[in-house]
Amino acid sequence: SPAQVEGDGHKEKRVSGGKNRSTRYYYVIGGTSFQISHSAYTALIDGLDYRVFYLPNTKRLLSIEPITLS
């Protein structure tokens, strides 16, 4: 069953060196790093509080939603 983490997050872009350079995009929340697509990277906002549902074994992100604090 999916796991859940909440908190403020930040975006990370990691570029691997070498001749075949590749860029991977991540969103880090609660100390857990999730690989995301470039479009998700563009859409997410640094420092906003999010709730993330993911598969614990693979860290595959299932859904991410902003948390509105009232």
Image (spheres, helix red, strand yellow):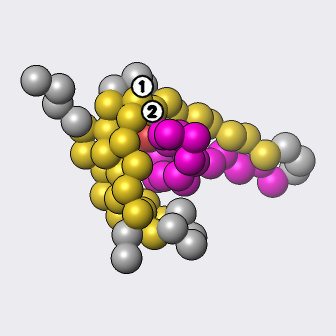
Q: Secondary structure at mark 1?
A: loop
Q: Amino acid at mark 1?
A: Asp
Disc on res. 9? 2
Q: Taking the image as drawn, is residue 39 in sight? A: no
For disc 1, the neighbor class at 10 Å (few under 14, some 14 to 19, many from 20) is some
Boundaries of the magenta span: 20-39
Q: Amino acid at mark 2?
A: Gly
Q: Is residue 10 magenta?
A: no
Q: Taking the image as drawn, is residue 23 in sight? A: yes
Q: Quadrant of the C terminus?
A: top left
Identify the residue at image location x=53%, y=63%. 59
Q: Are marks 1 and 2 in contact (CB under 8 Å)?
A: yes
Q: Quadrant of the N terminus?
A: bottom left
For disc 2, the neighbor class at 10 Å (few under 14, some 14 to 19, many from 20) is many
Counting every numbered tag in the picture gives 2
Q: Give the x, y percent position of residue 14.
A: 68, 40
Q: Which residue is mark 1?
A: 46
Whether residue 39 sits left or right of residue 34 in the image: it is left
Identify the residue at image location x=31%, y=45%. 51
Which marked residue is nearer to the observer: mark 1 or mark 2? 2
Identify the residue at image location x=37%, y=69%. 2
- How much space separates mark 1 and mark 2, taking CA atoms? 6 Å
Disc on res. 30? none
